[in-house]
Image: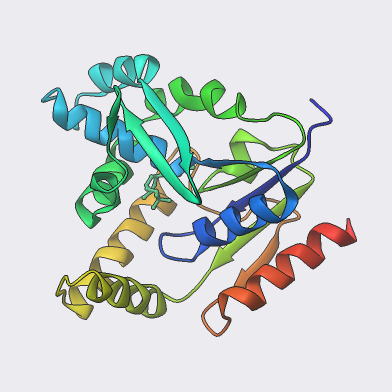
């Protein structure tokens, strides 16, 4: 238990939780933890060291020793694996799916627990993921669960890819997002679900500004 405040924002992939968490961290002047990036980097490290994504012992040993660092380059979050900038590489659909697989291994999750808790520093922490409010920071005073329909999340991803000049197929994206939701929600350890007392926000019909206002008002009310 500590007095350092934490705002947890959990939700499925593509719900906008990372964008909102970073905006709020900037607004409050708090630290920011992108917990999904840790799982993405772990999957990247496993591929780099040619480990089998189903080898639970090797993956949990790797999780214990993982050399991951975060840095801000102006407003952009830079993610470093063993000194190498992997910020772009870890954002692909493939990297997200691999992360979801390694994240389902209980020993991997416990190896990463304290590392995530160490981000709780004054004046406060904003963090996003799947189990931030339920497992990692259960005593957080502010908890949000941000969601949106799978179709809407796939549409957003489709537009993002298009902006980067990458053609994709909307129905494939919907299928991939639904499969990742299923894996993240049905796993035995720390499944994706709203924490008790969390503000549940559905952003299907809401823009970023509206979600930002709701979350700020929620934190001010407590
Ligand atoms: O939030 P994201 O899409 O970057 O996360 C990638 C994967 O990592 C996600 O599919 C499940 C896993 N993850 C998790 O299990 N627990 C977290 N706190 C964050 C992410």
Is 64 located above or below residue 172 in the figure? Answer: above
118 on left or right of 45? right
User: Which part of the image, by quadrant, shows the C terminus?
Assistant: bottom right
| Residue 69 visible in the current orientation | yes
Q: Residue at x 25, y 50 (%)?
A: 97
Point 10% across, 25% down: residue: 50
The image quarter in which residue 194 lies: bottom right
Specify the farthest residue to the front. Answer: 74
Q: Please tell me in which quadrant of the rendered image residue 62 appears.
A: top left
Name the colouring of the figure.
rainbow
| Location of residue 149 with respect to 43 vertically, above or below | below
Q: Position of residue 48 (x, y in %)?
A: 15, 28
Q: Is residue 200 depicted above or below 116 in this figure?
A: below
* Residue 38 picture location, percent across and down: 40, 35
Which residue is painted at 34% across and 31% down in the image? Answer: 80
Query: Could you tell me how many numbered marks the image carries?
Result: 0
Query: What residue occupies the far left of the structure in this picture?
Result: 50
Determine the image quadrant of residue 37. Answer: top left
Quadrant of the image for the N terminus?
top right
Q: Front-most of 87 and 184? A: 87
Residue 52 coordinates in the image, percent (x, y): 14, 28
Who is closer to the viewer here, 83 or 113? 83
Q: Nearer the viewer, residue 21 or 12?
A: 21
Is 73 rendered above or below residue 26?
above
Q: Residue at x 51, y 51 (%)?
A: 75
Mark yes or no: residue 52 visible.
no
Relative horizontal placement of residue 180, taking residue 27 as reference (left or right): left
């Amino acid at each position: 238990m500590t007095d350092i405040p934490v705002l947890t924002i959990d939700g499925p992939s593509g719900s906008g939780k990372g964008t909102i968490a970073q905006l709020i961290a900037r607004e409050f002047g708090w630290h920011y933890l992108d917990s999904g990036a840790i799982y993405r980097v772990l999957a990247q490290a496993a591929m780099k060291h040619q480990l089998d994504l189903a080898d639970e012992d090797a993956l949990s040993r790797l999780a214990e020793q993982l050399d991951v660092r975060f840095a801000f380059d102006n407003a952009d979050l830079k993610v470093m694996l063993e000194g190498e900038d992997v910020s772009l590489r870890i954002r692909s659909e493939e990297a997200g799916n691999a992360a979801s697989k390694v994240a389902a291994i209980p020993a991997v999750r416990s190896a990463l627990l304290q590392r995530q808790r160490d981000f709780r520093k004054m004046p406060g922490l904003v963090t996003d993921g799947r189990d931030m409010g339920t497992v990692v920071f259960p005593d957080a005073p502010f908890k949000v669960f941000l969601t949106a329909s799978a179709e809407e999340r796939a549409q957003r991803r489709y537009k993002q890819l298009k902006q980067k000049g990458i053609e994709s197929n909307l129905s494939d994206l919907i299928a991939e997002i639904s499969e990742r939701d299923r894996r993240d929600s049905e796993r035995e350890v720390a499944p994706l679900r709203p924490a008790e007392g969390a503000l549940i926000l559905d952003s299907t019909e809401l823009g970023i500004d509206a979600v930002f206002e709701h979350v700020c008002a929620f934190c001010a009310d407590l």
